[in-house]
Structure formats: C-alpha cells, structure tokens
Image: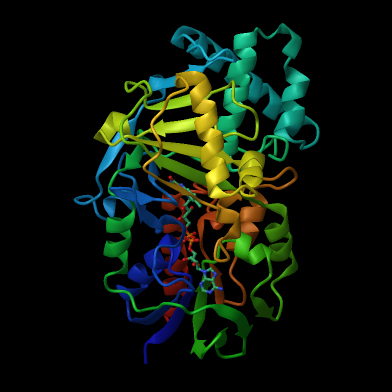
Amino acid sequence: MPKKIIIVGGGLAGLAACNELMKSEFDVQILEARNHPGGRASPQVNLGIPFGTGASWIHGADNNPIALVNKRSANMVSVSPEEFLFFDENGRPIPSQLIEKFNIKFDSFLRKAKKVAYEFLDVSLAQALANVIKFENFSSIELALFKAKLKYFEGYIGENYEFLSARCWDEEEAWPGDNCYLISTYQPIIQELSRNCHIELNSIVTEICIHKDNVEVITKNHVYFADAVIITLPLGVLKNSSITFNPPLPENKQKAIQNLGMGLFNITAIKFPFSFWPNESHAMFFTQFDNSSISTFFNLHHFIKEPILIGYSGGETARQLESYSDEQVIDKIMHNFQAVFGAILPEPENYVNTRWSHDPYANGSYSYYKTGSSQADRNALAESVANRLFFAGEATSLKHPATTHGAYLSGLREAENIKNIYAKK
Ligand SMILES: Cc1cc2nc3c(=O)[nH]c(=O)nc-3n(C[C@H](O)[C@H](O)[C@H](O)COP(=O)(O)OP(=O)(O)OC[C@H]3O[C@@H](n4cnc5c(N)ncnc54)[C@H](O)[C@@H]3O)c2cc1C
C-alpha cells in the first residue's frame, strides 16, 4: 500500500509538495478551505483584463522556480526602479540624481542601524535608525525621500518600521534578476501545478491529532487518516488558533508563531477611461499625501496601455484603510489626485480594493521579522513533529520568506523530507 500523505492547504507550497510527492509512490491528497487552489497567489478579478488581487510579482526573474513552472504562459514585464517617479512635499517631481544620492546615504544608515542592533539589543528599525540619523541635518527633499522609503517598507514588508526587527528585517536572499509584474496573473502557474493533484476544495480543517501509527485530520464534514501530514497554513491562521493540534504543538513552535509577525499589504486598483498621469514612469510615490493615504501607485498603463493605476498600502496605513468603505478609499485617492493632477479628472470606470486581514484563510498578507524574532523562529516553524507533521509555507522559508518562490521551494523541501523518511519504510 502506498503511504498516504495529506497536505493541508492548496497554495503554492501545498501544490509544490503534492507534485513532488506524486513523482514517487505516495497517495497524496490536498485539503483546501477555499473553493479554488492557489491560496494567496490565486484571487483575481476582472478589470477589463484579468487582475491578480494577491501575489502578482515575480521577485527576481532569472530562472525563478515559480516562473519556470509555466514559462510559456507566464506573461511578465520587467519593472525598473530607475523609472520610479517621486514627488516632493509640494507635489514637484524629485530629480533622479538627488534620489540616487539619497539611496546611497540611506543604505549606509541601514547598515549602521543593523550593526548597532547586533552589537547591543534588537530594537525596532525605527529606534535603530533614530540612533544613527541626525534628522535635523536632512533637507526637505531628503525628509520626503525618507518618508517614501518608509512607505515602501510598509508595502514590501507589510508593517511599519516601528515594528520591524532592526537585526533581521531584511535577512533574506534576493533572487537574482529584475522584479517582474505578471500580466497573466499567477493563474497559468496555479493551473499547471493543480493539473494532476487530488484536491478536496471547501475542506476546512479544524483539528489535527497525532496518534501512534497515523495522523487524524478533521474537517467540518469528514475525518481523514494519513501516515504523514504537511501543514502549509499561513502564519496568520496558525496565530489565530482556529485549528486544534492534539497534542499541542511543541513550545518552541508555538513561540515562533507568536514571535514572527504577520504583515498586512493591500491592493487598490482603479481603472480609468483614459490615463491622466505621466506615462513614462513605472511607478509613482507621492510624499505629500497624508499617512493614512495610499501613496504608491504602479502604472500598468506604461506596460500594456490599460489605464489602470495599482495602489499599494501596507502596515498601519493598510489597517486604517480597512476601516473605510471601498467608496471612501477611492474618494480619498481621487481627492489626493485632484491636488496633483487638477480638479477635473475622469471618474473611475471600475476598481478593486482588498482587505487581507479579513480573509479567514490568510489572516494577513505575509510574514515578517517582528522586533525580537530571529531566523531561529523560522527554523522552529519549519521543524517536523514526531515524523508525522511537516511544515511548509512562505513563513517557514529562511531564504525567501513572504514570496511565492519561497512558498514553492518550502513545499519541495518538505516533500523531500517525507520521501527521505517514508519512501524507505
Ligand atoms: C496581497 C498580497 C500580495 C502579494 N504579492 C506577492 C508578490 O507580488 N510576489 C510574491 O512573490 N509574493 C507575494 N505575496 C506573498 C505570496 O502570495 C505568498 O508568499 C505565497 O502565495 C504563500 O503561499 P503558501 O502556500 O505558503 O500559503 P497560501 O497561499 O496562503 O496557502 C495556504 C492555503 O491554506 C488554506 N487554508 C487556510 N486555512 C485552512 C484550513 N483551516 N483548512 C484547509 N485549508 C486552509 C488557504 O486557503 C490557502 O489556500 C503576496 C501576498 C499577498 C496577500
């Protein structure tokens, strides 16, 4: 009899593990709470074109394993930071030479802040930077660029720098190559990965019990038994304790779940009848907007001539905006745009506004290093329990957390672990 492996969660980690295990003699089944596979990379809406409201970028496109899954259908465009447009506090574009100069200065502050945190105590990135920067020596443009950098962190990491560990907030390996936006969305990749998998959709796992000879997995409607289980639940779901583990998870794993942070990153995309913004820019950063406004916009029009601006918000801004109605969020953006581009602007034709902290099967967007957490926490999260429970998912990835390729590779890692243990038995 082939060994039975259940995978909890049909996101990229679960799908990767399933495909890898199916290459050997295993009976593999995925239990997925949603009515479709793909997890945080899957949701999409129609904005005249298919539009991804979860993951939509390949971070580092040179032979990135997630892009290689369906190279033929993954249509992506390369985005260059040199083509980003930054507006100062008065709404004037900041010259690129000043941005380049500031970037060098800022990188050196980041290095110094990290050094201070490693030499003394882990503090927040905000505290560590305050120790190494003399803000009174900053020009108004440098202050504006500093604010833009913080907004960028909020989005990229999903949390404000007041909460990030100064020691390891950026301890990850960048995949080589450009950051690329997936015009095709992640759907072709998800379809390719799901093609041969046995996936039970609408299966919400509520309890997992380790017995002497097997593992019992309980959903709202069924009870399943397996030799081993791979758990790919998002950190946010593990944090809210909606799943009972029997016996409870080991203490170091529980501590890791608490220590690591689950960030929030939201997407607000607006389709207009025509574009009214500078088309040569790949993205625009508006430092004059107040802190509860979306101030970073990716310009899809530059790449595919669709008049769509994609607003990104993270951390505290995203949390605040989730308390607004969609209409209020759009009104606020339009009000801000009027101050920059003129009072008479076209009405949005269509829009989408995400609320990832309200998604019960994600409970946030992706993991980050909270002050006081460390790589040991990701390792503890990834550790298997009694050779029966195995853990994958972006938050367990030491080198590439918070990314699609990190999730994918973590699934392959745990499939390998299971093969090493069970293929021999
Ligand atoms: C808004 C947003 C934008 C992002 N942008 C990018 C990007 O551009 N590029 C990038 O590389 N990464 C991005 N990410 C991160 C990326 O999406 C994730 O790192 C990756 O998709 C995580 O895959 P996973 O398999 O670890 O988790 P998931 O995709 O979350 O898969 C876990 C699965 O478990 C299921 N599940 C949850 N609870 C239960 C339960 N009780 N029972 C059964 N199943 C359950 C979920 O429905 C889900 O399908 C983004 C994430 C978000 C939210």
Whether residue 361 sits left or right of residue 251 in the image: it is left
Q: Is residue 425 shown to the viewer in this render?
A: no
Residue at the image point whose x is 69% and y is 72% from the top: 249
Q: Nearer the viewer, residue 261 or 355?
A: 355
Q: Position of residue 152 (x, y in %)?
A: 55, 31
Q: Position of residue 208 (x, y in %)?
A: 60, 81
Q: Position of residue 110 (x, y in %)?
A: 64, 24
Q: Position of residue 350 (x, y in %)?
A: 38, 45
Q: How is the image coloured?
A: rainbow
Whether residue 72 sits left or right of residue 173 in the image: it is left
Residue at the image point whose x is 49% and y is 85% from the top: 227
Q: Residue furthest left?
A: 72
When the figure is inspected, residue 71 is found, relative to residue 190, above or below; the finding is above
Corner quadrant of residue 131: top right
When the figure is inspected, residue 155 is found, relative to residue 362, above or below; the finding is above
Residue at the image point whose x is 21% and y is 51% from the top: 73
Q: Nearer the viewer, residue 417 or 296?
A: 296
Quick one: quadrant of the N terminus? bottom left
Whether residue 333 sits left or right of residue 320 in the image: it is left
When the figure is inspected, residue 205 is found, relative to residue 116, above or below; the finding is below
Corner quadrant of residue 181: top left
When the figure is inspected, residue 266 is found, relative to residue 247, above or below; the finding is above
Q: Nearer the viewer, residue 338 or 101?
A: 338
Corner quadrant of residue 315: top right
Count of marks overlaid on the render: 0
Quick one: quadrant of the C terminus? bottom left
Q: Is residue 199 shown to the viewer in this render?
A: yes
Q: Residue furthest front?
A: 344
